[in-house]
Image (spheres, grey):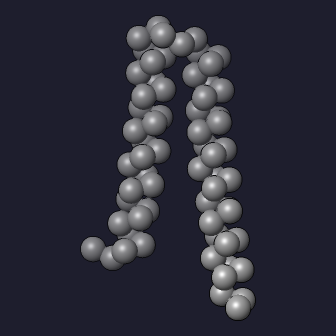
């Protein structure tokens, strides 16, 4: 397998794992629906934000 494909698969598996954990906590009535929505929005925000940060870092490193 190609290295970028492995990285993308790892990121997807970790995201699905975290989202699954949040959904499990919601189903087990440990957290409320509002808290679950906030946690999912925060999770998406973290992945998008760090993705942009890594992309900008890689672009800047190519400038040297």
**Residue 40 in the figure: left or right of residue 2:** right
Judge whether 22 appears above or below 7 on screen: above
Query: At x 64% / y 17%, what residue is drawn?
Result: 34
Which residue appears farthest toward the front when viewing the image? 64
Quadrant of the rendered image containing residue 10: bottom left
Quadrant of the rendered image containing residue 44: top right
Q: How many marks?
A: 0
Q: Position of residue 33 (x, y in %)?
A: 59, 15
Which residue appears farthest toward the left when viewing the image? 1
Query: At x 41% / y 21%, what residue is drawn?
Result: 24
Q: Nearer the viewer, residue 56 or 1?
A: 56
Q: Nearer the viewer, residue 43 or 57?
A: 57
**Residue 43 in the figure: left or right of residue 22:** right
Q: Position of residue 46 (x, y in %)?
A: 63, 46
Q: Nearer the viewer, residue 28 or 61?
A: 61
Query: At x 70% / y 91%, what residue is drawn?
Result: 64
Quadrant of image for the N terminus: bottom left
Judge whether 53 appears above or below 22 on screen: below
**Residue 46 in the figure: left or right of residue 27:** right
Quadrant of the rendered image containing residue 50: bottom right
Which residue appears farthest toward the bottom when viewing the image? 64
**Residue 38 in the figure: left or right of residue 17:** right
Q: Position of residue 14 (x, y in %)?
A: 42, 46
Query: At x 67% / y 72%, what residue is drawn?
Result: 57
Judge whether 58 appears above or below 29 on screen: below
């Amino acid at each position: 397998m190609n290295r970028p494909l492995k990285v993308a698969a790892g990121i997807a598996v970790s995201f699905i794992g975290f989202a699954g954990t949040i959904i499990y906590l919601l189903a087990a009535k440990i957290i409320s629906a509002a808290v679950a929505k906030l946690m999912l929005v925060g999770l998406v925000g973290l992945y998008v934000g760090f993705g942009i940060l890594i992309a900008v870092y890689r672009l800047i490193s190519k400038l040297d």
